[in-house]
Amino acid sequence: MIEVHDLSKRFGRVRALENVSFSCPDGKITGLLGPNGAGKSTALRILYTVIRADSGTASVDKLDVQKDSLRVREKIGVLSDGAGLYPNLSARENVEYFGRLHGLRGRDLVARVDELVDVLGMSEFADRRAKGFSHGQRTRVALARALVHRPPNLLLDEPSNGLDVMATRSLRDMLRRVRAMGVCVLFSSHVMQEVAALCDEIVIIDKGHVAACGSPDGLRAASGKDSLEDAFVSVLGSGDGLA
């Protein structure tokens, strides 16, 4: 479970987050939505311990992300907005390396990597060096790397960005499977179709504040709109929020 309470972060004069609070339960997929510059990536980076908040608290499975950062990293799988692959390693070797960092060894590691190669459609390039990969190929490898240790919490920043239709379908199927296993999934996205298809809960951030939160049906009902996209636009246009 992921919990955020009154989280604030500034970069100089820029207010990225101010008093942001939300929670993401286990066995649910929570979507983090908002326009560019709203603060979504800042919130995710705090949660996966890359930057520190100025104030407020955030926890993963009751572990404080600032006080227990090493233990938090054991509990999360992360797909950031930059894949950061080792270019001279193959796709398979990149995933195996992260598996070893998380304590996987021998047959268990090989079997898990083979499973991810199959599920994410990586077989054609699994044994090629990552240097020269397309954006979609890099994203798939980075996603496999995030999933290799079967983390109880997944933090994904624009996970379908650059993926083709088949890879996107595979990603959605995988996220539904990990949700069924009780995993807490938090992801940011600009694709309303993806959000509507996957999310149990939605948090809309605008200008560093939580503008609305709730289930897709709840947000549509509160806004009086039939589509999630129209509800999203209504929330941002009104500036009042529907939390």
Image (tube, rainbow, N blue to C red):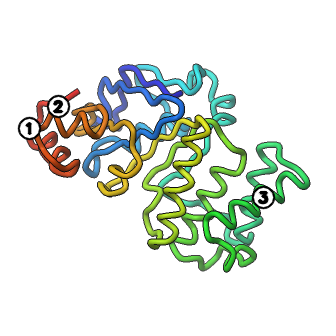
Q: Are marks 2 and 1 in contact (CB under 8 Å)?
A: yes
Q: Secondary structure at mark 2?
A: loop
Q: Is residue 206 left or right of residue 91?
A: left
Q: Secondary structure at mark 1?
A: helix
- Inter-mark Cα distance, 3 to 2: 44 Å
The residue that disc 2 covers is 241
Placement of the C terminus among the 4 image quadrants: top left
The residue that disc 1 covers is 238
Q: Are marks 1 and 3 in contact (CB under 8 Å)?
A: no
Q: Nearer the viewer, residue 118 or 23?
A: 118
Quadrant of res 223: top left
Is 241 located above or below residue 99 in the figure? above
Residue 13 in percent (x, y) is at 27, 36
Q: Residue at x 57, y 68 (%)?
A: 138
Q: Is residue 222 left or right of residue 191?
A: left
Q: Which mark is residue 96?
A: 3
Q: Earlier in the sequence, mark 1 or mark 3?
A: 3
